[in-house]
Image (cartoon, rainbow, N blue to C red):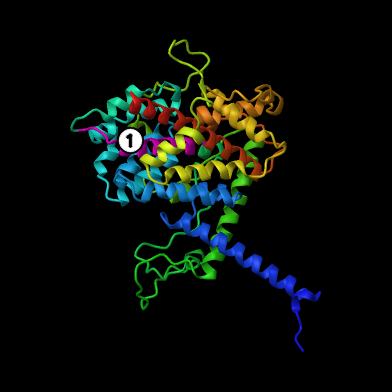
């Protein structure tokens, strides 16, 4: 007799399905851990913060890895130096130190880290467009593009410039997330294996205090995360770090004082401490209100005339292969996240940030911004988007009482992605104007 199991009301099928779902979840977490650990050997604070939204984290890590490490016209040490320049505009020591270390790992000249003056002339030429995109992107003009592409010994190719612009915008926006999430210091990093450790060494050995290197195993050099022990340690470290970050953030909100950096934690994370001011030539240049500037040539940027979907995406994807798809996936991922509180809040936050940067949507009622965003939240969003380093001090707005930790991260992700798209729109429009001039 043949029994059809799927027609029987046994709990076995439900249990199997539950086990299958758990396996899929574990594999998903494992993949995220692999991507986050691929370049640094451990889970950094930014990835830990974003881990509460795994779908977005997947998209973010994929894009960042592509920009920094995959095929592209710029050499890898140039990419990290450009990231240093971008982060320095907001005095983000976390990212400056992180990319300084990566710059040296990929063979960069240590002399360049003495400051922007020590860098090649080609990189110094990016300083102007770097500061404009970081603080007043509406000033970006096709003349800036023309100057960089002007034939000469130190000129840039169009493909190189597009990758540089994408990298600058990515790091500027990431500074907003770093400061907004109080992620400037990695509070509880997953232990890194000691130097000279063979590839088969398990991360849990370091977590358990066993730093002895097995003398017998010799395997080809590669990163291995197949061990369930490794995965468990990574998850445990990530969860503990998230809990510690939330605890410190709550204490910080209650006391209205900035977070204090423990010396041991700073030593663990900042492996190549570098003063951001070394890479800034015009420190006085900063954010100014778009509506308060009186230049006649400044006009509102209307999305109906130049949008990401209809113009920016196709241009950047043509000049920097596949990056358009990756960036578009980031924008779609953050837009698809479950909305904190009111479903219309996401669009209000997004459009408010674009409004601050002089970008308008003709089909949107901006009265909704004042209706949905309380004053404290608007002040916070503007600070994180426009002058994020100021959020470190005790005067930063604190509108977070009713929000969960994942919702706070969600708002910071919206700020980061809206700012990223705003910078890209201005830069890509300037490139388009140069191409048709």
Q: Which residues are magenta?
A: 154-176
Is 260 in front, or is 86?
86
Q: Nearer the viewer, residue 214 or 298?
A: 298
Secondary structure mostly seen in magenta is helix
* Residue 156 is covered by the magenta coloring: yes
Which quarter of the image is occupied by the N terminus? bottom right
Which is nearer the eye, 16 or 204?
A: 16
What residue is drawn where x is 46% and y is 38%? 313
Please state the horizontal and vertical placement of residue 229, each as a whole percent of the image. Answer: 54, 69
Q: Position of residue 166 (x, y in %)?
A: 40, 38
Q: Is residue 244 above or below residue 361?
A: below
Please give the name of the residue rendered at 35% of the width and 26% of the height, measured from the top-left corner: 436
Query: Among all residues in the image, which is located at the extreme left?
Result: 153
Please say whether residue 287 is visible from this viewpoint. Answer: yes
The residue lying at 59 percent from left, 33 percent from top is 257
Residue matched to label 1:
161
Q: Is residue 381 above or below residue 298?
A: below
Relative to 283, 246 lies left or right? right
Q: Position of residue 134 (x, y in %)?
A: 43, 29
Q: Is residue 274 visible?
A: no
Is residue 128 left or right of 60 when viewed as pictured?
Answer: left
Q: Residue furthest right?
A: 9
Circle 1 SS class: helix
Residue at the image point whose x is 59% and y is 28% from the top = 351
Tell me the quadrant of the picture where the C terminus can be found: top left
Q: Is residue 277 magenta?
A: no
- Above or below, 45 against 198 in this view is above
Alpha-carbon neighbours of circle 1 within 10 Å: few (<14), some, or many (≥20)?
Answer: many
């Amino acid at each position: 007799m043949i029994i059809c199991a799927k027609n029987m009301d046994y709990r076995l099928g439900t249990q199997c399905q539950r086990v299958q779902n758990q396996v899929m979840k574990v594999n998903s977490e494992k993949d995220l851990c692999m991507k986050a650990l691929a370049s640094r050997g451990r889970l950094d604070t930014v990835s830990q913060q974003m881990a509460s939204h795994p779908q977005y984290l997947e998209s973010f890590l994929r894009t960042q890895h592509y920009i920094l490490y995959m095929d592209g016209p710029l050499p890898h040490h140039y990419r990290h130096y450009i990231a240093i320049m971008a982060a320095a505009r907001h005095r983000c020591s976390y990212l400056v130190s992180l990319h300084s270390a990566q710059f040296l790992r990929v063979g960069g000249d240590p002399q360049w880290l003495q400051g922007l003056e020590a860098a090649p002339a080609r990189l110094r030429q990016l300083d102007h467009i770097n500061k404009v995109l970081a603080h007043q992107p509406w000033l970006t003009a096709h003349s800036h593009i023309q100057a960089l592409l002007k034939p000469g010994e130190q000129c840039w190719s169009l493909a190189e410039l597009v990758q540089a612009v994408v990298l600058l915008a990515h790091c500027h926006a990431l500074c907003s997330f770093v400061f907004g999430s109080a992620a400037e210091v990695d509070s509880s990093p997953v232990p890194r294996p000691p130097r000279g450790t063979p590839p088969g060494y398990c991360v849990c050995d370091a977590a358990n205090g066993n730093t002895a290197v097995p003398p017998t195993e010799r395997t080809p050099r590669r990163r291995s995360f197949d061990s369930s022990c490794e995965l468990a340690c990574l998850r445990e470290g990530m969860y503990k770090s998230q809990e510690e970050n939330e605890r410190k953030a709550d204490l910080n909100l209650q006391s209205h004082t900035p977070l204090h950096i423990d010396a041991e934690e700073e030593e663990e994370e900042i492996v190549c401490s570098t003063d951001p001011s070394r890479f800034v030539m015009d420190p006085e240049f900063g954010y100014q209100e778009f509506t308060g500037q009186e230049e006649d040539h400044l006009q509102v940027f209307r999305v109906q005339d130049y949008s990401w979907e209809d113009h920016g995406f196709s241009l950047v994807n043509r000049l920097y292969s596949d990056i358009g798809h990756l960036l578009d996936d980031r924008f779609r991922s953050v837009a698809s996240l479950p909305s904190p509180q009111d479903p219309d809040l996401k669009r209000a936050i997004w459009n408010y940030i674009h409004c601050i940067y002089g970008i308008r949507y003709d089909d949107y009622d901006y009265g909704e911004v004042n209706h949905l965003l309380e004053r404290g939240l608007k002040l916070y969003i503007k600070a994180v988007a426009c002058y994020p380093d100021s959020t470190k001090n005790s005067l930063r707005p604190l509108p977070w009482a009713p929000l969960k930790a994942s919702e706070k991260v969600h708002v910071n992700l919206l700020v980061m992605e809206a700012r990223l798209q705003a910078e890209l729109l201005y830069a890509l429009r300037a490139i388009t104007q140069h191409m048709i001039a």
